[in-house]
Image (cartoon, rainbow, N blue to C red):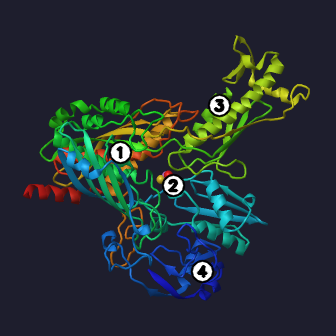
Amino acid sequence: HARIVRIDTSRAEALPGVKAVLTHKDLPDMPWPFQGPNAKLLDTTLRYVGDEVAVVAAVDEPTAEDALRLIEVEYEELPFVLDPEKALEADAPKVWPEGNVLRGKPNVYERGNIEQGLAEADVVVEQTFRSQHQVHACAETHASVAQWRGNKLTVWDSTQGAHTVREQLAQLLRLPIATVRVITQHMGGGFGSKLWLNKYTVLAALLAKRTGRPVKIILDRKEDALAMGNRPANIMQLKGGCKRDGTLTALYMKSFGTIGVYPTGADCGTPLREIYRCPNVKTEEYDIHINADQARPHRAPGHVQGTWALEQLIDMLAEKVGLDPLEFRRKNYSEIDPRRNQPYSSKGLERAYSEGAAKFGWETRAERKRQLSTATKKRGYGMATQIWGGGGGPPGYCIVRINSDGTADVLCGAQDIGTATRTTFLQIAAEELGMKPEQVSIAMGDTEACPYGPASGGSRTTPSMGPAVRMAAADAKRQLLDLASRVMKIPAERLAAKDGKIFDTQEPSVSKTIAEVARQMRTAWISPHAQIIGKGFRGPNPDGVSLNTWGAQFAEVEVDVETGEVRVLRIVAAHESGRIINPLTATNQVEGGVVQAIGFALHERRVLDPTTGQMLNANLRDYKLPTALDVPEIEPVFVALPDPVANSVGAKGLGEPPMIPTAGAIANAVYDAIGVRLTETPMTPEKILKVLEEKANA
Ligand code: MOS
């Protein structure tokens, strides 16, 4: 936390090979609305160790690094705070003059009456849980390449939202949207850290303008870990009450989420508010500023830590009333959305429970535990529930072109962020068109070629854009069948297309290939077309129903009571996300989500030096991502329940759901193994040994 008193770039500028240097002096009026109403792109006040000071463009990377070291800066140091609990004390250093609590007050939700609900309970449990900061650690760090041709700016960007970046860049640089092109063909992960425009992208564009050359900025691993966001840490104080038969009467949480320097959110109460049928629910959530990097959405924001805490509280209640954890959850199953008091478009959670439990062997776990545990290696079995918004929504657009040789091009808004969205959408288009997949090509992630599509976040790409793709394909097919009707002299209503052929539904042996029909486009007296253009858009979601995805995961662990090591042996992941369009890509989402959640549960955490605020493990050696050896057998169970109410492809989204329940299931399994609960993530060997020792001494 410091103010820049003096900055001298003259030595850097004099270095051969340096093409431009920018500091706050060069850009006094460039705002940065993403960090608050008065924030600047390059500011004179630096609020944490990752705030940008200067940027250099040079002919190569070593020259740029050398030039950065030649910039002289004099700082006036300011007081800082890194601990969220200290940040709440009256005499704590202030991150912002208004104080360290965002908006000065908590977000409060209440239904029923929490005091009454707790009073009515036969059993009440109370527990504080603490989750850590998790950084996204994308395989590909954040990166942009910017190039100007005349007044036209092209940016190749590693982003989850090509159109988002385009519109935000145009707005910030005061350019017509039409003059900005953003291209995202392939990228190595975002997980919520690449949902919007970043400073380095703007700086690349400004440097490219100034130097008349293309400029590439690729963040190194340290910069990426330090300044590109994180899952906020939460201190969650939970209280729950139920009747002797297990009926929930009250759920309460007070949460303190550490959002870092700039305004954002650390809400983690949705699972507690929405999973179970419970009449009295209250959450109070504080967002706390500290002098560290701003939190960003991280795959299932809030739900990962919120579910980890809630699902342990649920198990604690179940144990107190002597119910099987799964039975307790079933007892409090909500047939309608308990928060909005309205039905769901579909809810396959009961099937996720029963199909997951069957695959896992939940009923025989006690016997397996007896057989497989040894004196030093204890087996444990646990489960947890998942809820996520899902469902997607407008706006999003697609164009399908049928060419005169019977092939088709799909031009789709949105981008493929490594989830194989291209494959999924190509399947949807080919099926609707009645073509073989190899007759269809798809373009995404280019704002010049493709219409508008949303950023890929919130598990919304398939449910948002899938219906637009299907609609565009249906529109093109209708025109193709009109053409076929004239060629084949059969009424269009009688015609259908499948596997590359158009046939008479009343006499299926009468058919022509789509290629034969499409060739007639070139015959002017039959067809007005040289290419058929179909259009599709994403319409609104249905009124009066809640769109949610559901799941249940079951974990088997082995805890070594001598070393404290937890090994996850098996995860059965049962998910209901509507129609599964492609089982292979869906399986990839489940595997990736579970692995990332194992990192959260057992290994990963951001370590800040309390004396300097520096991140001490901003590299992949000391920041412990799970490796192949930490990955258990992961068995997906897809509850096949196409949701025709949600949208025209029946899919609800699966990007985030698999990451949500894993840590809770592991935590409950660890408790089952050792009989003592860990209330802090990551659940490291040190912490396991500590709670075992406390238990032994108790
Ligand atoms: Mo996601 S955390 O909405 O990319």
Q: Which label is found at residue 430?
A: 3
Judge whether residue 595 can be spotted in this image. yes
The residue to which callout 1 is attached is: 661
Residues at circles 3 and 1 in contact by the CB criterion of under 8 Å? no
Residue 661 position (above or below residue 437): below
Number of residues whose C-alpha sits closer than 10 Å to that of mark 3, classed few (under 14), some (14–19) or many (20 or more): many
- The x, y position of residue 325, in whole percent, is 24, 38
What is the secondary structure assignment of the residue under circle 2? loop
Question: Is the distance from the Cβ of mark 2 to the nearest ligand 1 atom less than 8 Å?
Answer: yes
- Tally of marks: 4
Q: Quadrant of the C terminus?
A: bottom left
N-terminal of the two: label 3 or label 4? 4
The residue to which callout 4 is attached is: 23
The residue to which callout 2 is attached is: 190
Number of residues whose C-alpha sits closer than 10 Å to that of mark 4, classed few (under 14), some (14–19) or many (20 or more): some
Q: Amino acid at mark 1?
A: Pro
What is the secondary structure assignment of the residue under circle 4? loop
Q: Amino acid at mark 4?
A: Thr
Q: CA distance from mark 2 to mark 4?
A: 28 Å
Identified at 53% across, 70% down, the residue is 36
